[in-house]
Amino acid sequence: MIQLIKGFKDVLPGEIEVWQTIERAAKETFENFGFQEIRLPIVEKSELFSRSIGDTTDIVEKEMYTFEDGKRGHVTLRPEATASVVRSYIQHKMYAKDPIRKFYTIGPMFRRERPQKGRYRQFYQIDAEVFGIDSPYLDAQIIFMLATLLETLKARDVKAHINSLGCPCCRPSFQKALKELLDAKKEHLCENCLRRSEKNPLRVLDCKVPACREAVQGAPSILDHLCDDCSDHFETVKRVLTENGVEYAVDKHLVRGLDYYTRTAFEVLTTSLGAQNAVAGGGRYDGLVKALGGPEVPAIGFAIGFDRLAEIVAMQQSIEAKGPALYIAPLGERAIEAAAHWMMQLAAKGVSCETDFGGRSLKSHMKRADKLNATHVLMLGDDELDKGMATLRNMATKEQGDLPLDGLVETLAERFK
Ligand code: AMP
């Protein structure tokens, strides 16, 4: 038997209801905040990711699914959505009409990470991006929007962690101070961090290797190096979050794995999922649109790990599949043909409907209707057909009564729509 590949998974009925609930809530919440949906390809030129995410990140260094595609050169299954959203924003000159655009997109991402609980090679993200606004009010607003969605979904045990990564003006002085510390701790750093401390020391703060974490314990805080503008920006974000009731913690070591972030960076962490505790992550990336060949447009965004959020939501509430409004239980060939006709007519009129063409007994029909969680069952055999009547049973109250077959579709459509 062929089985699925490790690190990949099926989302089956029983679990999908939670996913659908999350997706509906995300769409509604984001649209209330002025976001529009955008759908993008899963495959992009590899260069898009190496240029935007950065050559020294885990993702680009070792996690991308890249293959050669003839004349097109190297292409990659997207490891995240931001780069594609930015590419699309630039390619379609979306800034020409109005530089301010707010998008969300939901779909699969691919990273060749070591599979474990909460970490998959194909996982899903709910991604939101805003272009054209550099105000700190927006930073606070999108963290608020994320918190609102989590609250709507009753996802408890989650908290926003925020930091500022400064800007090209003030970050170099922090990088210098950090580099000095890293040089002094060289013998404690892992191989990756040794290399990164040369190319991009900030990334060492993001390393999960215990020895590296220990080594950077006493690292300087970027918050002590912010220029006045970045400092004011960060203070406003914190103040607006507080004023709007969003709980957060400042985490001076939060750096995000991606190279293009400036100023506000944030993560939503949970205490419910064990080691893979990040539910969402995001931040401002004011330099990326220009770096990818677009105009100088500031931007900010975040991505929610859909799989992890689904796990949290499923832990805290049970969302069950809704059964059909009507199960038609036909007894005999003529009744089966009538049931086939009615099911098509009713489903087409918006009544969720199920039946069975297999010639079951009434007992067996009732068993299946029960299993499917049908709210009503319509029973009919040849006798009923001759009399022009069928029996309708309410599965919850067990009440039943006769229903004329004449105008049946209209009567039921009216009642169950
Ligand atoms: P990132 O793009 O790395 O900032 O990831 C954003 C969110 O996506 C994280 O906070 C996780 O919730 C989720 N995520 C990232 N990588 C994986 C993965 N391999 N499996 C499942 N979820 C992931």
Image (spheres, rainbow, N blue to C red):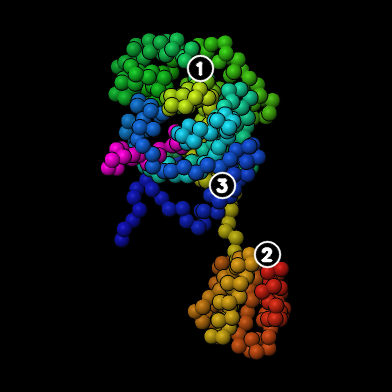
**Left or right of 12 on screen, residue 50:** left
Residue 248 rendering spot, x and y as whole percentages: 59, 27
> Does residue 205 appear anywhere in the picture?
yes
Numbered disc 1: secondary structure: loop
Distance of label 3 from label 2 (alpha carbons)? 23 Å
Q: Residue at x 57, y 10 (%)?
A: 228
Point out residue 208 in the picture as x, y percentages from the top left corner: 39, 28
Mark 2 crowdedness (10 Å alpha carbons): few <14, some 14-19, many ≥20: few
Where residue 216 sits, quadrant-wise, is: top left
Pointer 3: what residue? 23
Query: Which mark sits nearer the N-terminus, 3 or 1?
Result: 3
Q: Is residue 280 visible?
A: no
**Labels 3 and 2 touching (C-beta < 8 A):** no
Marking on residue 417: 2
User: What residue sits 55% from the left and 30% below the top?
Assistant: 96
User: Which residue is painted at 38% across and 39% down in the image?
Assistant: 44
What span is in magenta? 65-86
Magenta-colored stretch includes residue 64: no
Residue 136 on image: x %, y %: 61, 22
Q: Disc 2 on helix, strand or loop?
A: loop
